[in-house]
Amino acid sequence: MSSEENSTEISSKVFWRDLAVRYWIYVVIFAVIGIGAIIGFILTLDWYVNTSPVGGKGTWTFNQFSMGTGLEFAIFLILYMLVIVGVPSLAAAGIVTGLLWFVVFDEELKEEIKLRNKKDEERRKKIGKKSEGGGIFSFLMFLGVCIYVTLDGNWMTEFGSLNFRYFVDAWIAVFLWVFVIFCIGGGLGIIWFVKKYEP
């Protein structure tokens, strides 16, 4: 990497860091929206499993599902997630983004953001770097559920002996532990970040 590219990369990082510190309250608002979406996802999943006639309100085992009932269950779950969680969360994030862009940011800052976004996108295309965060998270969740099932004494229990509500509860429990740990770490990280770089 040339010294010019390195300098541009560093200045870009400094720019976004300073922008986040300067408008930290909006960063917190976006974080609250994200946390609200996650909580809404968990509550909606729990509600749907408990009330859906497909799946017998969580009492069915995996061998009781067919291709048709499994697909019906998944489609309605996705629709409920979109209506109850997805649309309100995107609307709230869109309102805050619009407020920032059309009311808070001045024209000079908006031009700088457009230029930075364009340069960052070109750099990403050039490097061709792909995010693997989703795969890592899924793998960690799988390991967490395996540990949960083992500690619960069901490692060798046949799937047909456990209803799918059990596995949903296991996934939710592991997710909440991961969520709490990352929220605490993220909150401490944000406080440290703002304190270190505030003007």
Image (cartoon, rainbow, N blue to C red):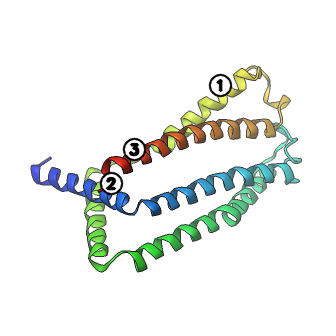
Q: Describe the element under mark 1 as helix, strand or loop.
A: helix
Q: Describe the element under mark 2 as helix, strand or loop.
A: loop
Q: Quadrant of residue 61?
A: top right
Q: Which residue is drawn at the image coordinates 66% and 63% (left, top)?
A: 82
Q: Which residue is denoted by mark 2 in the rendering? A: 198
Q: Which residue is denoted by mark 3 in the rendering? A: 192
Q: Earlier in the sequence, mark 2 or mark 3?
A: 3
Q: Nearer the viewer, mark 1 or mark 3?
A: 3
Q: Nearer the viewer, mark 2 or mark 1?
A: 2
Q: Residues within 10 Å of mark 1 (few under 14, many from 20)?
A: some
Disc 1 to disc 3: CB gap under 8 Å: no
Q: Disc 1 to disc 3, how far (Cα)?
A: 33 Å
Q: Position of residue 75 (x, y in %)?
A: 72, 58
Q: Position of residue 47 (x, y in %)?
A: 80, 53
Q: Earlier in the sequence, mark 1 or mark 3?
A: 1
Does residue 144 show up? yes
Q: Which residue is denoted by mark 1 in the rendering? A: 147
Q: Is residue 18 left or right of residue 3?
A: right
Q: Residues within 10 Å of mark 3 (few under 14, many from 20)?
A: few
